[in-house]
Image (tube, helix red, strand yellow):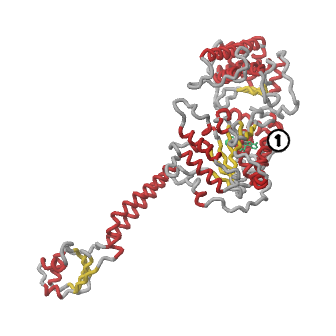
Amino acid sequence: MASAPSKNPKKKSEKKPLLPLKRRQSLRLHLGGPSFFGNLVTTVLIFLLLMSAYSLVAGLAQPSNSIPLSTVAADVAAGKISAITVNGNALSLTYADGAHKTSHKDPASGLPETLATYGVTPAELAKVAITIQGQSGFQFWFLTLAPIILPILFIAFLFWFLSRQVRGAGMQAFSFGQSKARITDPADSTQRVTFADVAGAREAKEELFEIVDFLKSPKKFLDIGARIPKGIILMGAPGTGKTLLARAVAGEAGVPFFSISGSEFVEMFVGVGASRVRDLFQLAKKAAPAIIFVDEIDAVGRVRGSGVGGGNDEREQTLNQILVEMDGFEPTEKVVVMAATNRPDVLDPALLRPGRFDRRVTIDLPDRRDREEILRIHARKKPFGPDVDLAVIAERTPGFSGAELYSLMNEGAILAARENRKEITQYDLIRSIEKVMLGPERKSHLLSKKEKELTAYHEAGHALVSSILPNADPVHKISIISRGRAAGYTLKLPFEDKKMQSRKQFLDDIAATLGGYVAEEMLFDDVTTGPSNDLMVITALARDMVVRYGMSEKMGPIAFGERQLGNEPYSEHVAAQIDAEVTRIIEEAKVRAMHVISTHRGALDAIARELVEKETIERDNFEKILIANGITPKKREEEGILIAPSANGIV
Ligand code: ADP
Ligand code: MG
Ligand code: ZN
């Protein structure tokens, strides 16, 4: 993904290969092997080949010009045969006239006795030169052993083949103790990531510089008796660049990077995870200085013993092993363990104790400046038209993570390529924002006239309530073109990146989200399944207000936490009170939304009419409709940046 070549690949590592080669190869070999049927065909073919080889060699002993023993006796008596070579039970006959024939004798008796029983006299036999020959060594052994060895070989082969299949299927049944870690060699410049590839995250980088410094010159720190943190845990929302940052630390320090995901530890066999951990730490210590990176550590590092009906033994053992390994580090060990999670709240406190993952680095979602920087990083090596202004894109993408920005740039390039253009334009990028946010447009998803009207009123409801309530975000765009799972959408953009939200903002947000439902109910005297997602969102939000943020006056400033089976931090009675508060918040928001819509009914109709006709309304047009209906649009802050250039026609 972000394997853009770093700007300073000058520090060429002159390290010895850090691992025995064989081990390195065994790590990920079974990826992309031949198909199951391909393998099966090969097996069968090899078996057939072996079989035919056998019958060929065996066949040598039984050539076809064989004659019965009685004829042999008669020919001997008649003096036609000059020599007989006996090889085991096979007789090779040479005739006086030069012909060669073969025959077989009874294995139980010798040739003279056999011929005597056919009436050959000793005198007649004396005229024949008889040579007794042992079977050739190879032939003898092959013929004797092949029937025993071939099936054994075949079974062994089948076994090996099946074990390969099983491994390919991910069970790892025959290699479960191995660490499965992916290793990035510092000398591999194509995989190298440095801090230059990570935009924003200034505080995180500062923290991590210290680690880089230590890994680069551990002696400096050890000489002065400094103890270097063993464990650093990176916390942040998905896609904020935690994995990227960890790789960048290794890249900056020029040390090998052992990375494994928490979920990979957890296999079907108890004890496998623990043995993998042991293996991984051993490898890393051998390669020290090195970094071990455990991605998504919450998969193994959840609070122990909280599961209902007994914990997950496997997970606990793996976690214990990680703790044991970290505790067992010598103070001089030059291995740093990094971990990443987007659920720091579920981590076992034992992981976060001093001496373990005691350094915590939080990575926030990027703010506007950081977003612009991230966009610039992913704009490298992409051809842009002259109208592209990444600052505008950054402005329009509050709440986007680094990963989403990356995917936005990629979508833009795909759009340009699909239309056979050589340059990416601003319009491509703007369309990509919505694609990343809401999923692709579904133009084929045709609405009936009634559905179209209903969707129009629903979206108009959202937009109107957002525009009237003072603490709701201003509307940027409304559309009834379905996207992803939504039939229509109203884009609201906050004026600035919000780090904190207030109770008033939440309440207005809930009312605006209910605006769609309320408009449907008031106009059509009925509700549809359309707003089900809206309802889920507001219910969760209202609940959070009560149990997490202490925003309910009745319940007071208490964080109640989750109530689950087996983990009941508060009583049934309190639970009922919480439910009542959630209901009250939503009811009150609904009343406010209804009030807005009935007071500004004219505006609602105008917006809905425009939507039915044009399907999409951009901010400029939307504000004109508001003004025409006596509503003052919300002030635009940072005038000039917030507006996308010539947004007409953007859907
Ligand atoms: P996480 O591990 O936090 O879920 P990743 O590190 O896997 O996120 O990020 C996914 C991708 O998003 C990266 O490979 C990179 O392309 C992009 N990305 C995320 N954050 C940044 C950033 N701060 N700067 C540049 N690219 C970023
Ligand atoms: Mg990650
Ligand atoms: Zn809605």
| Residue 5 in sight from this viewpoint | no
277 lies above or below 453: below
**Quick check: which quadrant has ligand 1?**
top right
Q: For the residue carrying disc 1, how many other residues have a C-alpha within 10 Å: few (<14), some (14-19), or many (20+)?
A: some
Q: Is mark 1 within 8 Å of ligand 1?
A: no
- Mark 1 falls on what kind of element? loop
- Who is closer to the viewer here, 535 or 27? 27
Task: Give above or below for 267 relative to 252.
Answer: above
Displayed quadrant of residue 373: top right
> Is residue 337 depicted above or below 578 in this figure?
below
Q: Amino acid at mark 1?
A: Val
Q: Quick one: quadrant of the C terminus? A: top right
Q: Nearer the viewer, residue 452 or 64?
A: 64
Rendering quarter of residue 41? bottom left
Residue 519 falls in image quadrant: top right
- Judge from the rendering whether residue 507 lies leftward or rightward of residue 319; answer left or right: right
**Residue nearer the viewer, 357 or 644:** 357
Task: Name the residue beneath numbered marker 1.
Answer: 388
Residue 505 at x, y = what percent? 77, 21
Residue furthest front in the image: 225
- Is residue 330 in sight in this rendering? yes
Q: Is residue 523 left or right of residue 390?
A: left
Image position, residue 339 (x, y; %): 68, 43
Q: At x 16% / y 76%, what residue is drawn?
A: 70
- For this orientation, the residue located farthest to the right is 639
